[in-house]
Amino acid sequence: MSIQSSLRLPHGTLRLPVFLPDATLGVVRALDSTDLERCGVQAVVMNTFHLMQRPGTSTIQALGGLHAMCGWRRPIVTDSGGFQAYSLIRQNPRYGRLTDRGILFRAESTGRKFNLTPEKSVQLQLRYGADIVICLDDCTHADDPLDVQRESVQRTIAWAKRGKEAFQRFIEQRQWSEGERPLLFAVIQGGRSRELRRQCAEALLEIGFDGFGYGGWPLDAEGNLLVDMIAYTRELVPPDLPMHALGVGHPASVVQCVRLGYDLFDSAMPTRDARHGRLYMFTADPNLGFTGEWFTYLYINDDKHIKSDEPISPFCDCLCCTRYSRGYLHHLFKINDALFLRLATIHNVRFMTRVTEHLRERRDEL
């Protein structure tokens, strides 16, 4: 179990555990910064792989960095882009290749070539003004062969070392103090091999980082959370160092991973589900805890909601539930109005922040 209760960052202190909505391209789709603040969002995750393409580094810097560009005053975590490179290149090799030097890829939209090295990934994140910088890693799927996992671990360790050296040079140039500088996380790879996970964790701990992420696809081929490997990887890291369950955002998975000692979570799933009409509901008062079937889904497209004057959830305090009915949301969804996207996303984001709020209150009891 993690003993971290908070994380001090340049733009504020995160109370742990915390769910971070994905603002991949500098926006949580359909919401502005005020919406996010009212939902209790403490921080968001943005992605270097995508941001360097759109709107582009020169534009981000011209607009004063990510915080100024987005009007977001609270912390920002920037993902390195390793997972996105995995998704793009391993599934579509014609888009680029991974080498020991870095990731060479071609943008899908423009065809422009990019070379993302461990040094450049860290430098871009620092220039963007990130509060937590994540080292570039070589992501794999849990079912990839052992030789692929072994190469991934070797490359991830080498890239993390180069990333930290670039990080330290940047901090020294800016003359930032310990309190001013962002934190640097590394990612532990190794697939389903305990030996490789151990080798990766030990090497990264020796290099020294402020925190770590669980690397690689966190689900098996059937979509089940890899609980044993996720738990084992947490055990490899001292409990006073924070752990980020990268890409974990299913409500039940978040609760499970908090029980295993993880502190930070991010996923595009809750906001994507909202836009498609899949809304999250507590089945009982969340103050009673998370046991049994404690949540379910409401599909707003169902005709049974046409004349319903009930809110999505009687246990939710979000703008959507305190002001609008299921019937009205069904109507907005059917006419494809942008207001549905905003209200539904507010609801699912608030659901996730409520989950982590209650977990924070009861972490000692888990």
Image (cartoon, rainbow, N blue to C red):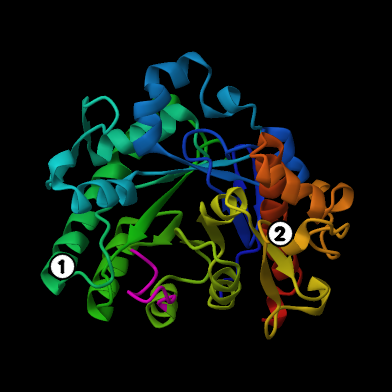
Q: Residue lying farthest top? A: 62
Q: Which residues are magenta?
A: 217-226
Compared across the picture, whether 74 is left or right of 178 comes to right
Identify the image quadrant of the C terminus. bottom right
Tag 1: amino acid: Arg
Q: Is residue 220 magenta?
A: yes
Q: Secondary structure at mark 1?
A: helix
Task: Give the Cα distance between marks 2 and 1.
Answer: 39 Å
Q: Which mark is residue 351?
A: 2
- Tell which of 280 and 120 is nearer to you: 280
Residue 134: x and y in percent read 40, 47
Compared across the picture, whether 181 is left or right of 15 comes to left
Residue marked by disc 1: 150
* Vertical position of residue 90 compared to residue 95: above or below: below
Dot 2, crowdedness within 10 Å: few (<14), some or many (≥20)?
A: many
Tag 2: amino acid: Phe
Residue 237: x and y in percent read 42, 70
- Tell which of 355 and 345 is nearer to you: 345
Disc nearest the viewer among 2 and 1: 2
Q: Secondary structure at mark 2?
A: helix
Residue 315 in which image quadrant = bottom right
Residue 28 in which image quadrant = top right
Residue 332: x and y in percent read 72, 43
Q: Which mark is residue 299?
A: none
Residue 176: x and y in percent read 49, 31
Mark 2 and mark 1 residues within 8 Å of each other at the beta carbon:
no
Q: Earlier in the sequence, mark 2 or mark 1?
A: 1
